[in-house]
Image (cartoon, rainbow, N blue to C red):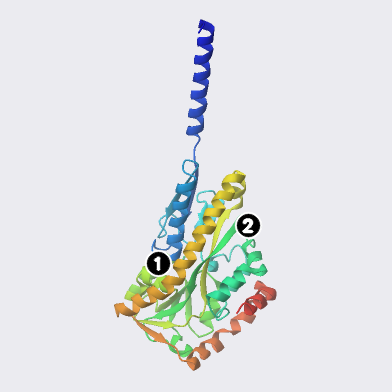
């Protein structure tokens, strides 16, 4: 090799080295996923599954960090944080979007869906899909629904008929429909973040709350609530969301890989949700810390009669077309 050639080859090697170092130094995209529940819940497991899939498939390009148990942001802050770019993924309950859209309030209407199959049918239908985009004008995108399940009523005294709830204080999520639902039975609703519920119950600052079996179990509400009425009166599901700015800023190929992993994680989370609704209910019964009350048809009908007028109250805000489609999904 002549001297000139040697210089040229060394130069090329040096350029290649610098180029490859630059590529490997390119910073991976960071996705912070913040949620409020325990890891051993449908949402907790879905978030961890998403991280696992991204680690497997997009290692070095995308890094997912999951923050459970309100560690990073609680209910009230997460959406604002997302708009500020401090968090990229979250899955708040559908009851927590009041500031962003009125239409999603549909999911809080008491006794609207007869079971989770009806919820799934509605969500996958045209109206349900349209609702995913109901927060778009606020800079947020709904990437999919995630199930938790049907809600039960827990309390410090047995609740068999609506009159039993009269003058009792119930913690609710930040939803006006849920407030109206408890007011309809003469109870006093209090909007409080999820992270405060256990202490409020333990110190008897409130008498009861409504939640799914997996939340009641994983956050130990059953240890401080001697009675749980199996009312299945409403649904607690989630909207998996991101900010438009973050989502549209992703390179196309990564965006579609991330969405695919998310869809798979959601499908996994939904299976966990269905199983936990059975298993965590049984674990609570087996613990003997709380008595699970099953309602007779006549007792249940009293709750329906008392709470259903709430539908009319919110029909204009929500949109009758959505309510009709939901009824049809049953
Ligand atoms: C609640 O606040 O009760 C739930 O929304 C918590 C959750 O995210 O499941």
Tell whether 97 sits left or right of 321.
left
Dot 1 surroundings within 10 Å: few (below 14), some, or many (20 or more)? few
Name the residue located 37 percent from the left edge and 68 percent from the top edge. 218
Give the image location of residue 1, x and y in percent.
50, 8
Q: Indicate the secondary structure of the residue bearing disc 2.
A: helix
Q: Earlier in the sequence, mark 2 or mark 1?
A: 2
Name the residue located 44 percent from the left edge and 82 percent from the top edge. 230
Q: Quadrant of the C terminus?
A: bottom right
Tell whether 104 sits left or right of 23.
right
The image shows residue 285, relative to residue 7, as above or below, that is below
Tell whether 310 sits left or right of 22.
right
Marks 2 and 1 in Cβ contact (< 8 Å): no
| 53 vs 294, nearest the viewer | 53
Q: Quick one: which residue is furthest to the top in this view? A: 3
- Do we see residue 289 in this rendering? no
Residue where numbered disc 2 is placed: 138
The image shows residue 197, relative to residue 113, as above or below, that is above
């Amino acid at each position: 090799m002549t001297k000139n050639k040697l210089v040229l080859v060394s130069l090329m090697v040096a350029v290649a080295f610098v180029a490859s170092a630059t590529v490997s130094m390119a910073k991976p995209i960071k996705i912070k996923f913040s949620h409020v529940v325990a890891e051993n819940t449908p949402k907790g497991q879905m978030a961890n599954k998403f991280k696992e899939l991204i680690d497997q498939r997009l290692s070095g390009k995308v890094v997912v960090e999951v923050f459970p148990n309100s560690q990073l942001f609680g209910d009230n802050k997460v959406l604002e944080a997302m708009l500020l770019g401090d968090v990229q993924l979250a899955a708040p309950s559908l009851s927590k979007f009041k500031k962003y859209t009125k239409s999603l309030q549909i999911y809080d209407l008491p006794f609207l869906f007869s079971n989770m199959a009806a919820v799934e049918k509605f969500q996958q239908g045209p109206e349900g899909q349209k609702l995913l985009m109901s927060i778009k004008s606020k800079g947020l995108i709904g990437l999919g629904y995630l199930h938790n399940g049907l809600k039960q009523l827990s309390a410090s005294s047995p609740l068999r008929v609506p009159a039993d709830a009269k003058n009792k204080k119930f913690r609710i999520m930040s939803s006006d429909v849920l407030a109206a639902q408890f007011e309809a039975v003469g109870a006093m609703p209090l909007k409080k973040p999820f992270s405060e519920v256990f202490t409020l119950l333990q110190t008897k600052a409130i008498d009861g709350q409504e939640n799914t079996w997996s939340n009641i179990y994983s956050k130990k509400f059953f240890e401080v609530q001697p009675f749980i009425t199996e009312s299945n009166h409403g649904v607690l599901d989630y909207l998996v969301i991101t900010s438009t700015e973050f989502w549209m800023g992703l390179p196309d190929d990564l965006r579609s890989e991330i969405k695919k992993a998310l869809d798979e994680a959601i499908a996994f989370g939904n299976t966990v949700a269905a199983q936990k609704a059975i298993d965590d209910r049984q674990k609570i019964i087996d613990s003997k810390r709380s008595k699970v009350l099953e309602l007779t048809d006549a007792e249940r009908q009293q709750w329906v009669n008392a709470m259903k007028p709430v539908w009319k109250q919110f029909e204009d805000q929500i949109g009758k077309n959505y309510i009709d489609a939901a009824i049809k999904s049953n």
